[in-house]
Amino acid sequence: MGLLLKAGISSDLVRTAVIAFLAISIFVLLINFLPFLKRIYPNYSLQLGGLIGNTSFLGIPIAIALLPNDTINFTIGFDLGTTLFSWIFGPYFLQKDKKNYPLNNIKKLIFSILASPASKGIIGVLITYLFGIEKLLGVILWIPAKLVIYLAIIVVGSRLGIIINNKNKLLELNYFVSYSIFLKLFIFPSFIFLVCKTIDLSKIETLAVVLQAGTPSAISTILLAEAYKKNQETAAEILFITTILSLITIPFITVLINI
């Protein structure tokens, strides 16, 4: 919420949120409707690991460190779109019994959307705009918002440490995990780059959005996999390897776009 107030609800924020949400949706639809892609990404843990990025815990701190403040609305917008997709559809994809999931009930679906962390943040911001206190509250919440982001990096590091200690043969990647990693770090950010060029974003705006698309797999993919007991090791492998490789790919993306 603090980040949203800092950025302000703008057309750029909404546009990049829509881009993120639709881009992930398009990839999921293509993978599940095209047989040859379904063979490469046979389960939803592979798909979510290859599409849902760690935008909140790593993407936004990276953007704050590397990019001008006036690009933060592009960064937060992409994070919102990713978060909404992850927490609305992630549980649905990983449910063993989809008959009872909210997508089959409009009222429950609406409740699920409103319960999303991104939705709560948006609702809170809209309330502050309604009372005309968005600037004051934005200043107040900006410092704790940055503190939470930096602490989140520590949480991610700790979580990776637990994964390394508890999972065996993390580096012995199978065929499917390798393709999911390639999707997350190369194919998806390349697609987002083409979208940015198509809608004529500036170089710095394009960099802000593509950096979010190129973040490593989100820790939420592990949380969802563990909650529904679906492919936990697969999710852990994707998170671990993409996080390590992103130390190379994110600087590479930055240099390549700035050329």
Image (tube, rainbow, N blue to C red):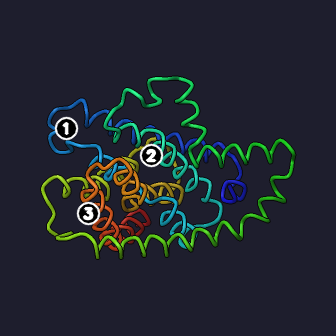
**Callout 3 secondary element:** helix
Q: In the image, which disc is placed on residue 15?
A: none
Q: Position of residue 225 (x, y in %)?
A: 34, 52
Residue linked to disc 1: 38
Q: Is residue 18 above or below residue 104?
A: below
Going by the numbered disc 3, the residue's amino acid type is Glu
CA gap between label 3 and label 2 equals: 18 Å
Q: Secondary structure at mark 1?
A: helix
- The residue sitting at 43% across, 55% down in the picture is 220
Q: Is residue 21 above or below residue 66?
A: above
User: Contact (CB < 8 A) between labels 1 and 3?
Assistant: no
The residue beneath circle 3 is 237
Assess disc 3: are there few (<14), some (14-19) or many (≥20) residues with their C-alpha within 10 Å of its C-alpha. many
- Which residue is disc 2 drawn over? 86
Among numbered discs 1 and 3, the one appearing first in the sequence: 1
Displayed quadrant of residue 15: top right
Q: Which sits in the foreground, 160 or 129?
A: 160
